[in-house]
Amino acid sequence: MSDAAQLLADLEVFEREAIAAFERARTAEELEAARVEFVGQRRGKFRQLEERFRALPPDGKRQCGRRFNECRQRVRAALESARARLAQPQAKAEPRAAAFDFTAPSLRIRRGTVHPLTQTIEELIDVFGRLGFRLADGPEVEDEWHNFEALNIPPEHPARDPNDNFYIDGQRLLRSQTSTVQIRVMEKQPPPVRIIAIGRVYRPDVHDATHFSMFHQIEGLYVDRHVTLAHLKTVLRQFAQAFLGPEVQIRFRPSFFPFTEPSVEVDMSWDVRGGQWVELGGAGMVDPNVFRAVGYDPEQYSGFAFGLGVERLCMRRHGINDIRLFFENDVRFLRQF
Ligand code: DAH
């Protein structure tokens, strides 16, 4: 958050607290103590805000100036009216309800905002919905069959290492990928399938600007006769352009995932000439072994699948540089969306 935005947020709190303290004062001594605390010349809280205001660069000052003066005036007015109230001899004894001034301007009540990740998820559902993908769902506590086995990840595969997963007991774990939902959907219905699944996944990662032990993925699965890699690329390009703008390009790099063959990493870029590509996630053509695990005939059907990071999409979209901000519940961050 910029210094100016931070100051605006702090002004808000300061104003609310100062006015409440002045209104609460029942005696001249209490009022004086509140005055010193909030607007005292030497150590009052407003002094510090004033110093921070003075330290802002010119455009920060421009951004805060009006609010800053408004706050000063409101707090002063509250102090004056508290003084007037206490100057009346009977005021002290009067019950609080009777002293309430119905004509005073109200404190501003802020409307909440929808969490940026929730906004992103709603948009993803909307964009993929327009491309014909239905929303599917699966549990966050999974068994090894859905998280690994049916996805062609054998017992000795490093992805199954207990140190890299949140196992709950010998058989169950917090899902490490939304690819589990592919299996759950195909087990329940015959082809064709065209679904997305969005939800939380869990990995014991050390938290830093780009890693968190819980994050969100969007998974896609399209199974039918004659589905090809060209369909995959078109769907992902159309998605990227709908979500981030028509100038966005995507590219595939060869990769490996046990549940797709061939497999690719998906990158995207706004300015291809600038050469800055951002990795979005993985994708590929569904491996025949996955089809066999759910009882689909790989000779008749083909399909593509993809898995993208939702936080990464949201961060790209809004220029957010630290994944931890999503989960700290700091309203100064959340309010900006
Ligand atoms: N499940 C993979 C992961 O968590 C991402 C992924 C890659 C999903 C390829 C897919 C896919 O559906 O086809 O890293």
Image (spheres, rainbow, N blue to C red):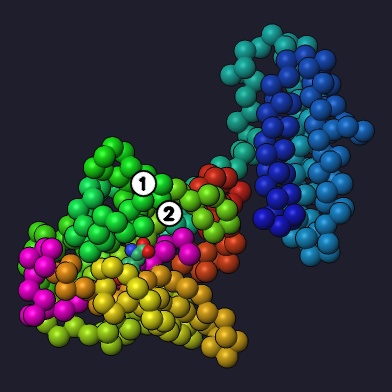
Q: Position of residue 184 (x, y in %)?
A: 17, 57
Q: Quadrant of residue 33?
A: top right
**Outermost right residue:** 42
- Up the image or down, 301 lies above or below 177; here it is below
Q: Which mark is residue 188?
A: none
Q: Where does label 1 land, which residue?
A: 162
Mark 2 / mark 1, whichever is N-terminal: 1
- Up the image or down, 87 lies above or below 60; here it is above
- In this view of the protein, which residue sits in the foreground, 85 or 124? 124
What is the CA distance from the residue labelled 2 to the residue labelled 1? 19 Å
Q: Is residue 53 visible?
A: yes
- Up the image or down, 70 lies above or below 29; here it is below
Q: Position of residue 225 (x, y in %)?
A: 11, 82
Judge whether residue 305 is colored magenta.
yes
Identify residue type, mark 1: Pro
Q: How many marks?
A: 2
| Quadrant location, ligand no. 1 | bottom left
Identify residue type, mark 2: Phe
Q: Position of residue 63 (x, y in %)?
A: 74, 60
12 relative position to 276: left or right: right
Q: Position of residue 73 (x, y in %)?
A: 79, 42
Residue at 68% x, 28% y: name it. 20
Q: Which mark is residue 215?
A: 2
In what quadrant of the picture does the N terminus appear? bottom right
Judge whether residue 10 is colored magenta.
no
Q: Is residue 124 visible?
A: no
Q: Quadrant of residue 242?
A: bottom left
Point out the stretch of residues depicted in magenta. 292-312
